[in-house]
Image (tube, rainbow, N blue to C red):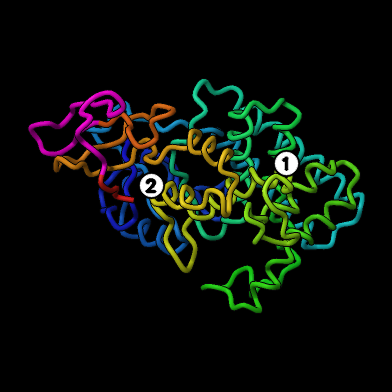
Amino acid sequence: MIYLPIEKLVEGMELARNIQGPNPMLPFAVAGCKLNERIIVRMQSVGVQGAYINTELAEGIEPEDFVEPELKAKMLTSIRKAFDESLKKMTFQSSRQIYQEITSVAETVVMNILSKDKYLFQMIDIRDYDGYTYSHSLYVGILSVLLGRYIGLPLNRLNDLALCGLLHDIGKTDIPIEITNKNGPLTDEEFEVMKQHPSISYEKLGQNTIISQAVLQGIRTHHEKFNGTGYPLGLVGEDIPLYGRILAIADVYDALNSTRPYRKAWSPRKIFDYLSSCADTHFDPDLLTAFLQCVAAYPVGTVVHLSDGSTAIVRDNTPGFALRPTIRIIAPPSKAGTDLDLSCEALNVTILDTEI
């Protein structure tokens, strides 16, 4: 399969993966269906940035899910439930029940990741505006656990990291909706209000005896910056708890990887370059170096343009060679179908840009 941005989709193309609607249990377009104008317009209206398409040249190219689609839908439902209950100012007893369910989701995230032979995040998630809060929480949990696994954290701390990711933004339920859903950049005054959400999350979750102080502090500090210019405490360097330093990287990566009403998702390579530029300022440089071994600059299925004028699809990625994936040439026709591992072949050829 091949990933194409929304502006490249045309009628008659066959979907290779479901397109989710606002309800994660009810896709509005399913794998195998042929695209038509109505489906494409609907995708655009909810903010879906692209789709995986079946094509002969991409046969055998299959991005690996870190969480199977049905399980992901159940997880997103649980996360939505927790946020909805938080919005209702839940009682202690209701919060205890909700967070027990979220703890189970966190453990499932960890077990899914530990079951993978290759822990390299190399897929593009297809999501919409309406589900952003919940999918963002899930993916911050997944990315945090990936990094935690890479640096050798034990199982109990991986479970903590997953829980941090799932709940890190729950304080936003107490922020005025006109700020959280604003279709554009926040004013200085609005941003001051938004900056309260880590502290609100900390206070809200601190009422629940199930959640450890380590998790609470990780959630509280996910907007701290390594150079001390973050919030709410202005901590510097390793004074920021480990979970907070990990969440900071995962949070920014996923936010930039998501389409919002006021901007398109960034390309994975652009995100990769931006994160690298923030070592020592926003992010712990050692953790960032490790994180960039856990994510692919060019996810599987991405269309890339090469320095020799060829166009190719990313077939696979090799840990340690983020900018040199294995590719399959699709143009020019004389080279179509040729596979190259750029980590050890065609060393004079580089990737210039992508279709994302």
Q: Which residues are magenta?
A: 328-351
x then y, percent, for residue 296:
43, 37
Q: Is residue 80 visible?
A: no
Answer above or below: position of 345 versus 245. above
Element carrying mark 2? helix
Q: Amino acid at mark 1?
A: Leu
Residue occupying image coordinates x 62% and y 39%: 144
x then y, percent, for residue 42:
41, 60
Tag 2 residue: 269
Answer above or below: position of 183 versus 71. below
Q: In the drawing, what numbered circle is on residue 163?
A: 1
Answer above or below: position of 30 versus 48. above
Q: In the drawing, what numbered circle is on residue 95?
A: none
* Residue 341 included in the magenta stretch of the image: yes
**Which of labels 1 and 2 is toward the front?**
2
* Residue 118 included in the magenta stretch of the image: no
Left or right: 58 as drawn, with respect to 242: left
User: Of residues 242 and 215, which is closer to you in this image?
Assistant: 242
User: Of residues 318 and 313, which is closer to you in this image?
Assistant: 318
Q: Amino acid at mark 2?
A: Arg
Within 10 angstroms of label 1, few (less than 14), some, or many (20 or more) residues? many
x then y, percent, for residue 116:
54, 23
Give the quarter of the figure containing the N terminus: top left
Residue occupying image coordinates x 33% and y 52%: 5
Residue occupying image coordinates x 73% and y 51%: 81
Residue occupying image coordinates x 31% and y 59%: 37
x then y, percent, for residue 290:
54, 35
Counting residues from the start of the chain, the first of labels 1 and 2 encountered is 1
Element carrying mark 1? helix
> Hey, which quadrant is residue 153 in on the image?
top right
Within 10 angstroms of label 2, few (less than 14), some, or many (20 or more) residues? many
